[in-house]
Image: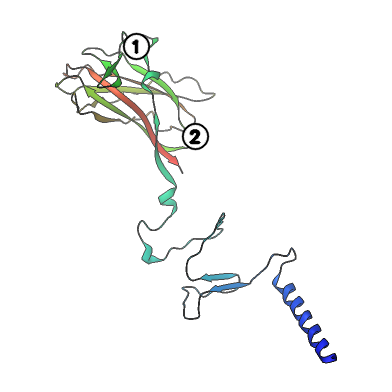
Amino acid sequence: MFQKNSLISICIVAVVCLFLMAAKPDGITKFTSIWIGDSTQTADVTPGVNDAYIYGTLEVDGAVRLDGTVTVASEFSGTSIVTATNIADVVRYYQLPLLSFTSYAADAISNVTASTTPGLEVGSAYPMLVWADSEVTPATITFRVPSDYVSGGAFKVLATESAASTDNQIDFDVYINSDGVAYDSAATGQTPVVIAADTTTPDEVILTVATDFASLAAGNWVTLRIWRDNTATGTADMQVRGVAFYYTATQ
């Protein structure tokens, strides 16, 4: 009886000691290293103290925090690797509604309507800003550069023409303003961009801003002005059906 009780006591002490050795003071179980897989598996790096090896699928139904370097095996080269290059930046678009543009004539601003220049019309069920031949009054809009802006910055314009004609050109400029800085009073003259379009096939024209966007930053206020460049020999109406600002953003 004594031997049996002594054996039980020894086992209890051993279990308690193992528990104390395997647990941190706050009761969280602690392992100095973990190997999940059979003995035939071979790790690229032999686990040591505070290391882990897992063979098979790992599922985590919560947040994952990585405080060290992430190394991907060489056989998974290409798009299989998820790195900062893949996810850090993305191109995003900020739509500039046509109905938010105003007519800018001799420092007089008015809402764009069917009777202004440019005029607000509907073509093929789509709203559009329209400049007839010889009309050069700018349409203007002001917007704030989004807070996730990182770099770049340009405009895409969807445009058509009212008839087959020598291609028209879109001219444009921008003003940049920011909090606590004197108003921008001068804009760099931009190079007009040809519209390669007709009555049924729209052309997406890219307006790239030279110089003025060199120091563009998140939170800046941009005033865009677009108009028909009357030096081109096209006589058909120039029709702008959509305008968007696009840029490289943080993920």
Residue pictured at 66% horizontal, 69% vertical: 30
Indicate the amino acid at tag 2. Ser
Vertical placement of residue 11 versus 54, above or below: below
The label shown at residue 113 is 1
Quarter of the image where the N terminus is located: bottom right
- Graded by Cα atoms within 10 Å as few (under 14), some (14 to 19) or many (20 or more), the crowding at tag 1 reads some
Front residue of this view, candidates 205 and 219: 205
Is 72 displayed left or right of 50 in the figure?
A: left
Q: Nearer the viewer, residue 192 or 124?
A: 124
Is residue 52 shown above or below 116? below
At which x and y percent is residue 116?
32, 9
Q: Residue at x 38, y 18 (%)?
A: 99
Identify the residue position indicated by label 2 in the image.
Answer: 147
Residue 172: image quadrant is top left
Q: Quadrant of residue 111?
A: top left
Report the Cα–Cα distance between label 1 and label 2.
32 Å
Residue 244's x, y, as percent?
36, 29
